[in-house]
Image (cartoon, helix red, strand yellow):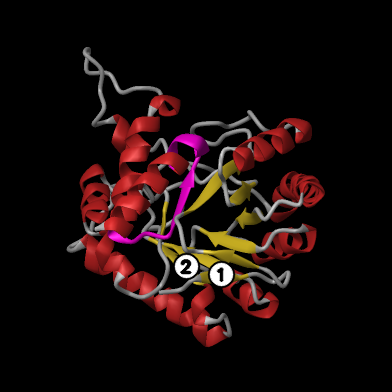
Amino acid sequence: MIDALKLPVGRSLSMRRPIIMGILNVTPDSFSDGGRWLDIDAAVAHALRMVDDGADVIDVGGESTRPGAEAVGDDEQIARVVPVIERVRRALDGRGSEAVISIDTMSPRVAEAALDAGAAIINDVAGGRFGTIEVAAERQAPIVLMHMAGEPKTMQDAPHYDDVVSEVRAYLVERAEAAVAAGVPRGQVVIDPGIGFGKTREHNLTLLANLDHFVATGYPVLLGTSRKRFMGSICVDANGDPPRPDTLVGATCATTALGVAAGVAMFRVHDVLANRQSADVAHALRQTS
């Protein structure tokens, strides 16, 4: 078991309890909170509020990866994320906070700019296929490698697997080994099964029911289910209508508790306080059993 992620700033991020990663989308079109944090002052205030609520990591992203989303160029992503990262990092340092910043991007240029601005972790939904692995190796930064079928614009066009658990697991192990071969220390590679990224509701549920298969790889696992559509299709109201994404807090917390029980190390969420509590209680129960 890995006790901590070593960060490129001479610090480490303890993994002795579940890590909560708070989502900070500085985009106009993210599926749940697009446009809410485009103003820098609002974004910084939200980041600090998430830290107060128990976030260990603030995950800043400048490109929506919702189903059907169009790609955003490097220059636009950098213009969106770098000022926010710089301001959040200064604010955290001013508080003496141990919280760290991650950059949610598939682009090596954006990853480099974000690390220069004060980010410490790369979170890549494309599994490092476009060059972020090499950036992580050069900068000795932890990297999260996620499974996604195709690209955001097309990933929900009839996704198919013969065995979703074994195929996603094999892909993630291959990408993790590629990162290690490129020079990223094994203890700094995190894998993410990519719930909702090129999967049907049944695929997502099967992956969630088999999280232990990913934990068994020996790599820390990140789980990102927050407010996702497949849960809305389960939690319909009395009229059979799905709830708004921002009301799926309880549903997300259920998957967080399930993940902790399976040994998942990190959770990427919108609603930090509720998921912090869910993770902590589930962790205490797991430690007791």
Q: Position of residue 133 (x, y in %)?
A: 57, 74
Identify the disc placed on residue 190. Answer: 2
Query: Callout 1, which amino acid?
Result: Leu
For the C terminus, give its image quadrant.
Answer: bottom left
Furthest toward the front, the residue is: 288
Magenta part of the chain:
262-275
Of discs 1 and 2, which sits in the foreground? 1
Query: Callout 2, which amino acid?
Result: Val
Toward the viewer: 133 or 59? Answer: 59
Q: Where is residue 233 in the image (x, y as percent from the top left)?
A: 26, 31
Toward the viewer: 1 or 173? Answer: 1
Residue shown at 66% from the left, 56% from the top: 100
For marks 1 and 2, the one nearer the N-term is 1
Residue shown at 78% from the left, 58% from the top: 117
The secondary structure type at the circle numbered 1 is: strand
Toward the viewer: 131 or 89? Answer: 89
The verdict on residue 269 being magenta is: yes
The secondary structure type at the circle numbered 2 is: strand
Q: Quadrant of residue 38?
A: top right
The verdict on residue 86 being magenta is: no
Q: Where is residue 174 in the image (x, y as percent from the top left)?
A: 39, 78
Question: Quick check: 131 above or below 263?
Answer: below
